[in-house]
Structure formats: structure tokens, C-alpha cells
């Protein structure tokens, strides 16, 4: 609770400055027995899965056939709002479906004690859940006179009084929570509408429509036919529809968990009016289709970004864990965003190192990961590392294909070395844009439209002069490197074909090699090896190919690797 990954003036030293959550006080006692990120992820998965039981019971209580109630429960387990919330780290939003579904079930049963208890647990999850509690109470009061089923027991005056008291307590609780968070983090400021409601663009509007569609589609759009139940989700929907903060209205975040249950309640209410086999088939077909198209790890989502693919551990992963295990338990560590979870059992581990603090004992980075070049925004891990390397002496203790463990004052040899290797990818060489979060140039080669990308090679046409590829834009340590290129040309002779240059753009050229026609052999591709040395860290190294235009040149492979 004390150490925050991003320390310093703009970030709190305690999580209570971000969210006021009494629930965390309870979870900490569980975490104490097994202090590991996996403990939190396991708890989160349980919390997200448990509402399936309540959804089934809610369906039965609503007089759905058991098979139909079971369908809704199973669809919840493959629902995008459930799966993406479980995929995206550990977040308090994951507990909202459990307490909200429990509150609704006990509201159906008119069990006031358990309903109020569930609402209290929801409120104690994090401070802004109070708006869901208030919306739930409003829904219950509005729904009561609209009951179509005369046999359903109306709310008693005592229940209504409980709900009114709950709203009052929730409002007071929220005000007090804001005070506590402000005391824990004075720089947090107060809630300002101008900071919540941003500028709405046309692109954002399309994303918001898609957001609602993706939450409704797995339920065959049934929630749209029973909008009263969506009143419970109205506080968050209002925020999502009026904000310009993209994560609020896109699926691959934790936020859909906040409103997933109201969408299921609305679908169940709509299904009550027409309980036919056709409705069940529609829900099953829609749920499975959306699951296959838009869930994490499925083949379709994998095409959009490697971040949404399920990566199984390989030998390189094992070596990286072995490298991390060399870090002394009591040492301080600066680690980039995607590596930080592997270091959270250490007391002093950050992703944003305080500028006025003593330097960290270790720096852990992966220069072939986009996180190294993009996060934290405004002060990336690369910028932090280069600043620390400029001011202090760090040596590489372990390296696994661009994954580095650097130790302060270390002058010994590297251990568990797997040399860095980067190569031109003929499949993705044409475009630097892979997905929204991958929109960056680092870690890859790029080929412009003037160069043909064909099966098994790229073709540089005769007459084309100038740069014909760039990359891989990697931050590399001092050492010796080898570039291996396999190519051929339609005309041989003494005229220059290609020049290879290794440089940091507009700053320094490290070395260059000119390839002429007489250096190639007739009858097939020729392998050319070129070696160069870096005497210092290169912030962004490129191996660029420059065509002289005298002949058509075909490049079959290009590889950059470290040799010492």
C-alpha cells in the first residue's frame, strides 16, 4: 500500500491517494500469506467468475427456464466485459460485478439485510462505486410501481427507508473518502467537471457506439429492449459517453466490469417477455460469435496486436526469469512497465524513478519491447535509463536477447548471455502501424512504398536512389555487432549497389559499408557480413540501406546481432 510504481511529486506514496478502498484492507491480509502478483490475479479471477452463479439464480428468480438461466450464466463467463477485465492487470473494478449481482439477487428475494450488506461491500470496493449504489436504490424505487407481475412482492416501506438511508450514507461516505484521498495525496486535487467531461470528437463518438454495441451484442441486443435495468449503469455510462478518455469507452480495459451486470439484468428482463427456444439460440450464437471475434487471445484479436495474443513461456522466458532472480531481494529496482509485475515483491521497485532520489541498485529493461520506448508517458524508461547511465556507472550483469539487468557499480562479466538479434520482417516491413498501442517506430525495420515487398524478399527497383529501409531503432549497449545481408542483383560490376550505414539519426554515424556489383557472385544470392563496434550506448541505432540506383537489387534477409 505504501510503495507506488510511479513515485514522485505527481504520484502518491500510498494507493489510498488514488482510490479509497476498505476492501483492500481485507485483501492485504490474504496477500500477506502469499505476497505475489499471482495471488492478486487468482483472487481477481474468482471475483469475476462468481457472479455467474448469481446471474443463474437471478434468472431462476425471474421465472426463466433453468436452461435459459444457465445460458446467461455461461455467456457471462465468456463476455468481453468479464474477460478483458480479467486480462488487464489487477483492478478493484473486478469486484463490482460480484457485489452488484449479489445486491440484485437479494433485492429480488426481498432480503434487506443481505441486500444492504452487498451494497456496503460494493461501496467499500472504491469510492466512486457509491454512484452505482445510488443508481441501484433509484432503480429499485422507480421499478416498484412498474411491476408487471402482480405476484411479485412490492418493496415494503421499511425497505424503501433502508434504501433512502443507504443513499444518504453513500453520499456522506463519498465526501469523506474524497477528503481522505486528498490528505493522502494533496496534489490529487478535487473533482472538476472540466477534467471529467472532455472534448467529444467524431472518432470518439464512433468508439462509444461500438462500446455499447460490444456490450449488447453478446446478449443478442436484448438489453436495449429493457432499458430500465440499465439505469443502474447510468452513472458510468454518462461518464463514458461524455468523456474523451478513451479507456472509459473501449473494451480492452478493466472498466466494462463496472456495467456488465446491468446489461445482463436488462437481458434477463427482456427474455422474460418471450421465453422461446429461438431466444436461447440467438443468445448462444451471439455470445459465441462475439467471444471468438473480440475476446483476448482469440485468433482474430491476435491479428490486431501481439499484446492480445496468449504467449506461452519458452526457453527465453525462463532465462529472463533466471536473470531477474539474480537481483538481491533488498535492492531497489527501476523496471519498465511490462516487467514491473515480476519485481513487485521487492519493497522498492518503480517504473518512474524520483529524480532527486539516490540511483536504483538495478535497472531492468527489455529494449525490444515497445514499453521501453513509450512508457511512462513524458518520461519513458529509455529516457530514465540513459539519464542514469550518463550520471552513474552501471554494468550489465545479465542479458537475454535485449533483456538487460544492469547493476550499479558492476564491473564483472555478463551471465546467461543470449546475444541480441533483430531482423527485417518481410511480412510487416511495409507498414510501421500494427495496432493502436503499437503506433511507434522502435524495434522494427520499415520499408517505404517505393520498394516492392514480394514473396521471400524485397525488390529495390533500378533507378531508385536513396534510403530503402530504416531500422530497427533500438537502444544498444557498447559492443561489437554483425549485420548479415543476403542479396543479389540483375547487373554485376564495379558500380556501387547498396551502402549500409549504422547511425543515430542526425547525431552520429558509427560505421558504413558499400556493396558493389563485383562483391556478388553469379548464379544466386550472396551472403555479405559486415561488423562494426559501438563504444558507447546508442540511444536509437539504425542500420539503413541506401540504394545507388544502378541495378535492380533483391534482399532476401537482413539480420543485426550482437557478437560480443
Image (cartoon, rainbow, N blue to C red):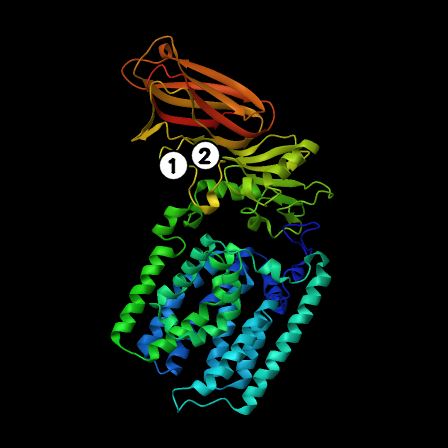
* Residue 86 visible from this viewpoint: no
Tell me: 346 left or right of 74: right
Q: Which residue is mark 1?
A: 428
Q: Which of the 4 image quarters holds residue 2?
A: bottom right
Q: Crowding near pointer 1: few (<14 within 10 Å), some, many (20+)? A: some
Badge 2 element: loop
Q: Residue, x 49% and y 39% (percent of image)?
A: 440
Mark 1 or mark 2: whose residue is earlier in sequence: 1
Q: Which of the 4 image quarters holds residue 182?
A: bottom right
Q: Residue, x 64% and y 37% (percent of image)?
A: 407
Are the residues tagged 1 and 2 within 8 Å (C-beta)? Answer: yes
Q: Is residue 22 above or below residue 316?
A: below
Residue 347 lies, in percent from the top left, at: 66, 52
Q: Which residue is mark 2?
A: 444
Q: Residue furthest top?
A: 494
Residue 493 lies, in percent from the top left, at: 34, 9
Q: Residue, x 57% and y 36% (percent of image)?
A: 398
Badge 1 element: loop
62 or 165: nearer the viewer: 165
Q: Is residue 116 above or below residue 212?
A: below
325 or 148: nearer the viewer: 148
Total labels: the figure holds 2
Q: Is residue 292 above or below residue 418?
A: below
Tell me: 391 left or right of 278: right
Tell me: 479 left or right of 172: left
Amino acid at each position: 500500500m505504501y510503495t507506488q510504481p510511479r513515485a514522485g511529486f505527481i504520484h502518491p506514496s500510498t494507493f489510498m491517494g488514488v482510490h479509497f478502498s476498505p476492501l483492500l484492507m481485507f485483501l492485504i491480509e490474504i496477500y500477506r500469506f502469499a505476497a505475489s502478483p499471482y495471488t492478486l490475479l487468482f483472487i481477481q479471477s474468482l471475483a469475476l467468475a462468481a457472479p455467474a452463479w448469481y446471474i443463474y439464480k437471478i434468472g431462476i428468480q425471474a421465472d426463466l427456464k433453468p436452461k435459459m438461466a444457465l445460458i446467461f450464466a455461461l455467456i457471462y463467463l465468456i463476455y468481453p466485459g468479464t474477460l478483458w477485465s480479467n486480462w488487464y492487470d489487477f483492478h478493484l473494478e473486478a469486484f463490482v460485478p460480484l457485489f452488484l449481482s449479489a445486491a440484485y439477487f437479494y433485492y429480488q428475494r426481498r432480503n434487506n439485510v443481505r441486500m444492504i450488506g452487498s451494497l456496503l461491500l460494493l461501496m467499500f470496493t472504491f469510492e466512486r462505486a457509491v454512484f452505482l449504489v445510488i443508481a441501484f436504490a433509484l432503480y429499485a424505487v422507480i421499478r416498484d410501481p412498474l411491476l408487471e407481475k402482480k405476484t411479485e412482492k412490492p418493496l415494503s416501506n421499511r425497505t424503501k427507508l433502508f434504501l433512502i438511508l443507504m443513499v444518504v450514507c453513500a453520499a456522506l461516505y463519498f465526501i469523506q473518502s474524497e477528503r481522505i484521498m486528498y490528505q493522502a495525496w494533496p496534489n490529487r486535487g478535487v473533482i472538476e467537471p472540466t477534467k471529467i467531461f472532455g472534448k467529444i470528437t467524431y472518432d470518439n463518438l464512433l468508439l462509444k457506439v461500438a462500446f455499447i454495441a460490444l456490450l449488447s451484442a453478446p446478449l443478442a441486443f436484448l438489453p436495449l429492449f429493457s432499458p430500465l435495468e440499465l439505469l443502474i449503469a447510468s452513472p458510468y455510462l454518462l461518464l463514458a459517453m461524455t468523456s474523451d478518455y478513451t479507456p472509459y469507452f473501449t473494451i480492452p480495459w478493466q472498466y466494462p466490469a463496472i456495467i456488465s451486470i446491468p446489461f445482463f439484468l436488462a437481458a434477463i428482463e427482456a427474455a422474460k417477455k418471450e421465453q422461446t427456444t429461438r431466444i436461447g439460440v440467438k443468445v448462444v450464437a451471439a455470445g459465441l460469435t462475439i467471444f471468438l471475434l473480440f475476446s483476448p487471445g482469440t485468433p482474430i484479436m491476435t491479428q490486431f496486436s501481439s499484446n492480445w495474443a496468449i504467449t506461452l513461456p519458452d526457453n527465453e522466458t525462463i532465462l529472463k526469469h533466471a536473470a531477474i532472480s539474480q537481483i538481491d531481494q533488498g535492492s531497489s529496482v527501476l523496471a519498465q512497465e511490462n516487467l514491473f509485475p515480476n519485481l513487485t515483491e521487492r519493497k522498492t521497485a518503480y517504473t518512474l524513478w524520483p529524480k532527486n532520489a539516490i540511483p536504483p541498485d538495478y535497472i531492468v529493461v527489455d529494449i525490444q519491447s515497445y514499453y521501453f520506448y513509450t512508457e511512462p508517458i513524458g518520461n519513458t524508461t529509455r529516457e530514465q535509463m540513459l539519464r542514469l547511465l550518463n550520471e552513474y556507472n552501471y554494468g550489465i550483469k545479465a542479458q537475454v536477447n535485449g533483456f538487460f539487468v544492469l547493476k550499479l557499480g558492476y564491473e564483472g562479466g555478463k551471465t546467461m548471455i543470449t546475444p541480441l538479434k533483430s531482423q527485417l520482417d518481410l511480412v510487416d516491413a511495409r507498414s510501421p502501424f500494427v495496432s493502436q498501442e503499437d503506433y511507434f517506430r522502435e524495434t522494427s525495420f520499415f520499408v517505404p512504398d517505393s520498394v516492392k515487398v514480394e514473396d521471400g524478399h524485397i525488390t529495390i527497383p533500378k533507378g531508385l536512389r536513396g534510403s530503402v529501409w530504416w531500422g530497427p531503432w533500438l537502444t544498444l549497449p557498447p559492443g561489437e555487432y554483425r549485420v548479415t545481408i543476403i542479396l543479389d542483383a540483375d547487373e554485376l560490376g564495379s558500380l556501387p549497389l547498396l551502402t549500409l550505414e549504422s547511425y543515430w539519426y542526425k547525431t552520429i554515424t558509427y560505421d558504413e559499408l558499400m556493396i558493389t556489383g563485383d562483391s556478388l557472385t553469379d548464379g544466386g544470392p550472396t551472403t555479405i557480413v559486415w561488423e562494426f563496434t559501438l563504444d558507447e550506448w546508442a540511444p536509437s541505432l539504425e542500420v539503413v540501406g541506401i540504394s545507388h540506383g544502378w541495378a535492380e537489387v533483391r534482399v532476401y534477409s537482413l539480420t543485426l546481432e550482437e557478437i560480443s
